[in-house]
Image (tube, rainbow, N blue to C red):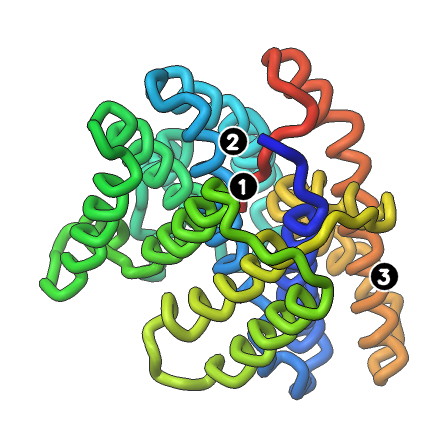
Amino acid sequence: MPRLPGLQLLRALAALLVLIGHVLGEAQHYFAVSLPITALPWTRGVDLFFVISGFIITLSASRRLDQPGVFLWRRFLRVAPLYYLFTTAMVATLLLLPGATKGTELEPGQIISSYLFLPFERHDGRIAPVLSLGWTLNYEMFFYVLMAFSLCLRRPFVALALLMLTFSAACLFRWNSTTAQFYSNPIVIEFLFGIGLAQLFRRNIVLPSTPLALLAVAAGLALLVTLHQTTLPRFVAAGLPAMIIVAGGTLFCPPLAPARLLLRLGDASYVLYLSHRFTLRALTLLLLPYLPTGPAGLWGFVMLACTSCLMVSLLVHRWIELPLLRLLYLPRRIGAVA
């Protein structure tokens, strides 16, 4: 797949949104203050990831229309090893340092489900794996399986769209099954938004223009903020704005040469997503007792936490993720996921 600098920047943006949202949430909890800034849709970076993933995977799959098995195996190798590493780290933390986590309990069924990328309902009613952020990867794997199945059919992308819409329509029914509830979530439609953009891109239906690209990104971000507090379904309130943002970074984005650091953040976005909770929790436990309780301590914590999470992710990407990908015979530059 061609390397798209605009898409790299959006991957960095999505990861930063999630990071900032979690850091602000941690700060608000431990400093016992209400931060107006937390009303902004920081965690909607996940929706941006889903649209980006739909775009990237469509372009990747279009090169292997007659190789569904190869496509699925390569996607598994791209996602699973690093996720297994951090999941194992979380299991070890819960076993050895149970007091270091916030309200997370370890259950055997949850451990098995985590490694199989299957939904599991926790004791608190939330459907999430041991590494709670991994709920998004359960959807990613679901998307990959549907894509691989669709590649066996005559019109794979049409078949995939119909399959995903069918699963989403199932949300109209009341399911007692955790699995049915999870996979019928209309959030999977956000992958379809990315598929649609990728199909336009494949047909060279693009209009490179810096003003249009900036306008699309700005309009998408404005819609994210405006629709955040509404009762609209998430795939509308967050998915559609995310689609507009991704269109700005792909269909409208002219050739550019972003700062090398931003490109590296895009490359490390998957690591940042998986690792930042560990870094953030460690900082909270080690440094919080020594920080002043006023605004200086609060914003000092926020800045230190964001910087540390970014630095750790870049180091893990350089010294763990890239060697792991090389060991698995994957190209260094490969499409990232959420």
Hey, what amino acid is under mark 2? Val
Q: Residues within 10 Å of mark 2 (few under 14, many from 20)?
A: some
Left or right: residue 63 compared with residue 12 = left
State which tag comes first along the sequence, 1 or 2: 2
Kindly report the distance in space between the C-alpha atoms of the residues bearing marks 3 and 2: 29 Å
Residue at the spot of label 2:
79
Q: Residue sitting at 60 percent across and 61 percent down? A: 248
Relative to 174, is 124 on the left or the right? right
Disc on the earlier residue, 3 or 1:
3
* Residue at the spot of label 1: 337
Q: Nearer the viewer, mark 3 or mark 1?
A: 1
Could you say whether the residue bearing mark 1 is in a helix, strand or loop?
loop
Q: Tell me, yes or no, if residue 129 can be seen here.
A: yes
Q: Is residue 18 above or below residue 331?
A: below
Residue 149: image x %, image y %? 25, 28
User: Considering the numbered disc 2 on the image, is that residue within a helix, a strand or a loop?
Assistant: helix
Under tag 3, what secondary structure? helix
Which circle, 1 or 2, is nearer the viewer? 1
For the point 68% across and 28% down, the residue is 333
Q: Which residue is mark 3?
A: 304
Residue 204, how many percent across, how many down? 52, 45
